[in-house]
Amino acid sequence: MVKIAITYTVGCLWVLQQQTLYTVPVTALIIAIFVLLFFRLGRLIAILIIAVAITHWHGQQHIDSQLSTQYINTPISITGYIIGIPERRDHYIRFLLAPDDPRLPPKVLLSWYYPPEDLLINSGEYWQMTVKLKPATGLSNPGGFNYEQWLVQQGIGATGYVRQQPIPFKQRHAQTFQIDNFRQLLAQKIDDKLTSSPYIGLAQALTTGIQQQIPQTQWQQLSQTGTQHLLAISGLHIGLAAWLGYLLFGFIGSRFSSLLIYFPKPYISAIGGTLCAIAYAALAGFSLPTQRALLMVVIFMLSMLSSKPIAPPQRLAFAALVIAIMDPFALLSASFYLSFIAVAIILTVMSTHLPKQRWQWLFIHFAIALGLSPILLLFFQETPLISPLANLVAVPFISLIVVPLLTLACLSLLFSTLVSDGLFQIVDLCFHLFITTLSFFTSLPIPTLSVNLTLTLLICLS
């Protein structure tokens, strides 16, 4: 399975790096499938051909969904549904719209400049507006944010802005329950509880995935210490939710012996862990990183229920293969590699018999920070040398203390104002300690390693 996953990934990456799409002849594809099903010799080559063909199909689907030239920079009236949570800034609102017109891309990113101050846009609402659109392109700098690549990963086919005239208007409210509306409501509740706190954005990011209110100074501290990944609900947090759910449901199941007659404890634990992971991923709006992490959790839970033991590398390889088949554009994302490499490092260290097992968790965090350095250098061209030490402190603090406390605080909103007030005050204190610790690390005279990384140097570092 590991060889298959690596071969398929190589085929995907080869296609994604090409300037033009190369069509795989139907005959070659049929022969490859025949070889894959009935022969062992040449199976990897067959997988490579299939990977190229499937990735080509995804790429062609993306090209076909792009904005037609006749609509570029032309005022057009469109109607459609709001997708996700709109992002409100000082003088504009940015949001995703799914147009009804089949001639337009299925998803467009719009900016509404200088909207009315009392304007509210919510997920699931149906709007009519006049817009100007342009192709989904952008700038890319080495080590910086690749905007165009991000648009591709998000499936956005065009960007543009809303015209002030004619005045846009909402034709109808959301007709059904929207998880994004619940996320907005929860973010507002957190805002109400932490009104005067500078850490509102951190609390909202860890519960709902909304990062709009995190100040730039805090982002700089996170970046300078290599801990910004802690504010993204992805593999680390989804895995923690699954682990807690696994333990909790296993404990509950063991207390009802009659239930164990029909459902063995491992099944109850696995179902509970999966449900908790799904719930946390839903709070993050099922973003692409959470979808990948959730898929890993489901595969791991299913493999635990298998009558035949499945080695951890096989589980990882299968998860990577499924993701590459469903969404090859994920291979362009740094989070894809960071998540899988981090899990692989953890499994490797956990299977190693260290002299002092009680210090194993220390070694795990150092190994993760060092092991991810080549990927960080490849995508961002820099890595803070203080990162291993900062993550050694921050990862367990956020994962094992802050996130559980924040979860309890949000749950307490349902039954007790007094309890929720107290828990949110404790959470606020925890964030203060967290940011203070990051400030200490950034004050140390430890530089950031920055290089103009070539492929050869990357291989040497790896």
Image (cartoon, helix red, strand yellow):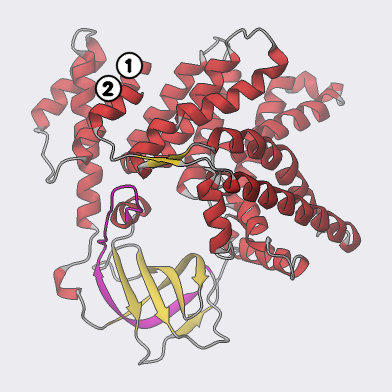
Residue at 75% x, 65% y is 194
Judge from the rendering whether residue 386 lies leftward or rightward of residue 401; answer left or right.
Answer: left
Q: Is residue 120 left or right of residue 419?
A: left
* Residue that label 1 marks: 3
Assign a secondary structure to mark 1: helix
Q: Residue 346's quadrant in the figure?
A: top right
Residue density around tag 2, few if under 14, some if 14–19, many if 20 or more, within 10 Å: some
The foreground one among 389 and 268 is: 389
Circle on res. 227:
none
Kindly identify the amino acid type of the residue bearing the numbered disc 2. Thr
To which quarter of the image does residue 336 belong? top left
Quarter of the image that includes the C terminus: top left
Q: How many marks?
A: 2
Q: Is residue 213 above or below residue 322?
A: below
To which quarter of the image does residue 132 belong?
bottom left
The x and y percentages for residue 258 are: 85, 23
For the residue carrying disc 1, how many other residues have a C-alpha within 10 Å: few (<14), some (14-19), or many (20+)?
few
The reply to whether callout 2 and callout 1 are in contact (CB within 8 Å) is: yes
Q: Which residue is mark 2?
A: 7
Residue at the (56%, 70%) spot, across then down: 175
Give the residue drawn at x 54%, y 47%: 228
User: Which amino acid lies under the numbered mark 1 shown in the image of this protein?
Assistant: Lys
Q: Is residue 271 visible?
A: yes
Q: Nearer the viewer, residue 329 or 451?
A: 451
Comparing 106 with 294, the one in front is 294
Label 2: element kind: helix
Q: Image check: 284 left or right of 462?
A: right
Q: Which residues are magenta?
A: 123-146
**Magenta residue check for 82:** no
User: Residue 430: where, in percent of width, then height?
Assistant: 76, 50
Q: Position of residue 238 (x, y in %)?
A: 60, 39
Front residue of 104/419: it is: 419
